[in-house]
């Protein structure tokens, strides 16, 4: 009986197929919260007191940046803080990447978008962050409702040379002033290099509720966040596979010679 030897032609074909040129690599990510509506439900309609809320403060922050310092480039960052209930956009772009964070000024309307192609450089990243925070006072015996639409989408091509970790995150958070009780919605669409998946997408309608069951007014914070991020990682070079192939062939040849000696008549 002779030792089994891996079929070199079949293995070579498999490895060459794995390293064959692919489409131009690139990636994109989008996160958006939109169509937000606030409503109230009176928990004790029989008492004759009105349920409701009043706004206290409103703020927003938009950040867009690219960071190419790991390959000798620079960090390009733009931060915008629009006036309350005002539209704004933070935008930055290089030859290889673009980042945008935006709000229309409507309550809860935030979005983040990033895209890059082959050229951002390994170890570098592009990110966008759009956030709104509101403080309001809930009247006694009031149930606050928040509804809207949320989208998280991450996509990439699996080209040669660069890998892409693509991540999107959306969150809606309601909490009291002391951050003791909160209601939170979070959605994410990650794509980690090494997975064969090229698209992760979630789009849905959501509704959250937060109650003030007491007889005193309560201050409540609302936070809306849209985040998108792409980081570039290394992909194994074709030479790595060729070295592996060479090692396997040498091992197979050695086993074959050893088998010839052991089983020689």
Image (cartoon, helix red, strand yellow):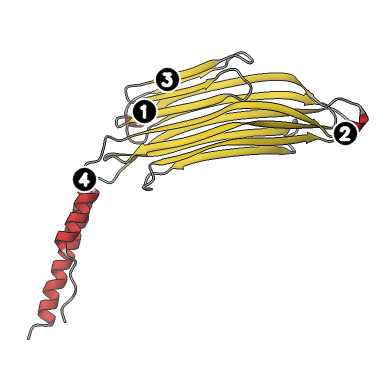
Choose between 147 and 107: the one closer to the eye: 147
Say which residue label 2 marks.
44
Q: Residue at x 78, y 35 (%)?
A: 211
Quarter of the picture holding the N terminus? bottom left
| CA–CA distance in space, label 2 to label 1 | 57 Å
x and y, in percent, of residue 19 in the image: 22, 47
| CA–CA distance in space, label 3 to label 1 | 13 Å
Say which residue label 4 marks.
20
Nearer the camera: disc 1 or disc 4 = 4
* Label 3 vs 2, first from the N-terminus: 2
Say which residue label 3 marks.
92
Quarter of the picture holding the C terminus? bottom left
Crowding at label 1, few (<14), some or many (≥20) Cα neighbours within 10 Å?
many
| CA–CA distance in space, label 1 to label 4 | 28 Å
Nearer the camera: disc 4 or disc 2 = 2
Q: Tag 4, which secondary structure?
A: loop
Q: Tag 1, which secondary structure?
A: loop
| CA–CA distance in space, label 4 to label 2 | 68 Å
Say which residue label 1 marks.
68
Along the horizontal axis of the image, is 72 left or right of 99? left
Q: Residue at x 60, y 26 (%)?
A: 35
Choose between 169 and 127: the one closer to the eye: 169
Crowding at label 4, few (<14), some or many (≥20) Cα neighbours within 10 Å?
few
Check whether the beta carbons of the residues at disc 4 and disc 3 lie within 8 A of each other. no
Crowding at label 3, few (<14), some or many (≥20) Cα neighbours within 10 Å?
many
* Label 3 vs 1, first from the N-terminus: 1
Along the horizontal axis of the image, is 172 left or right of 200? right
Nearer the camera: disc 2 or disc 1 = 2
Q: Tag 2, which secondary structure?
A: loop
The numbered dot on residue 88 is: none
x and y, in percent, of residue 56 in the image: 74, 19
């Amino acid at each position: 009986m002779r030792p089994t030897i891996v079929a070199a032609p079949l293995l070579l074909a498999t490895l060459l197929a794995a390293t064959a040129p692919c489409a131009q690599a690139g990636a994109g990510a989008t996160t958006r919260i939109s169509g937000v509506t606030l409503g109230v439900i009176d928990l004790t309609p029989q008492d004759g007191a009105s349920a409701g809320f009043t706004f206290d403060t409103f703020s927003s922050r938009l950040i867009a940046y690219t960071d190419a310092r790991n390959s000798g480039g620079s960090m390009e960052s733009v931060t915008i803080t629009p006036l309350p209930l005002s539209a704004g956009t933070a935008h930055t772009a290089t030859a290889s990447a673009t980042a945008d964070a935006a709000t229309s000024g409507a309550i809860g309307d935030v979005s983040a978008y990033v895209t890059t192609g082959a050229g951002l450089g390994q170890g570098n990243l592009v990110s966008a962050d759009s956030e709104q925070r509101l403080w309001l006072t809930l009247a006694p015996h009031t149930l606050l409702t928040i509804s809207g639409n949320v989208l998280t989408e991450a996509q990439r091509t699996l080209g040669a040379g660069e890998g892409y970790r693509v991540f999107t995150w959306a969150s809606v958070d309601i909490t009291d002033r002391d951050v003791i009780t909160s209601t939170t919605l979070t959605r994410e669409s990650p794509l980690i290099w090494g997975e064969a998946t090229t698209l992760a997408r979630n789009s849905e309608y959501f509704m959250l509720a937060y109650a003030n069951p007491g007889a005193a007014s309560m201050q409540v914070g609302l936070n809306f966040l849209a985040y998108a991020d792409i980081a570039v990682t290394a992909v194994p070079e074709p030479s790595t596979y060729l070295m592996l192939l060479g090692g396997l062939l040498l091992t197979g040849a050695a086993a074959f010679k050893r088998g010839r000696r052991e089983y020689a008549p």
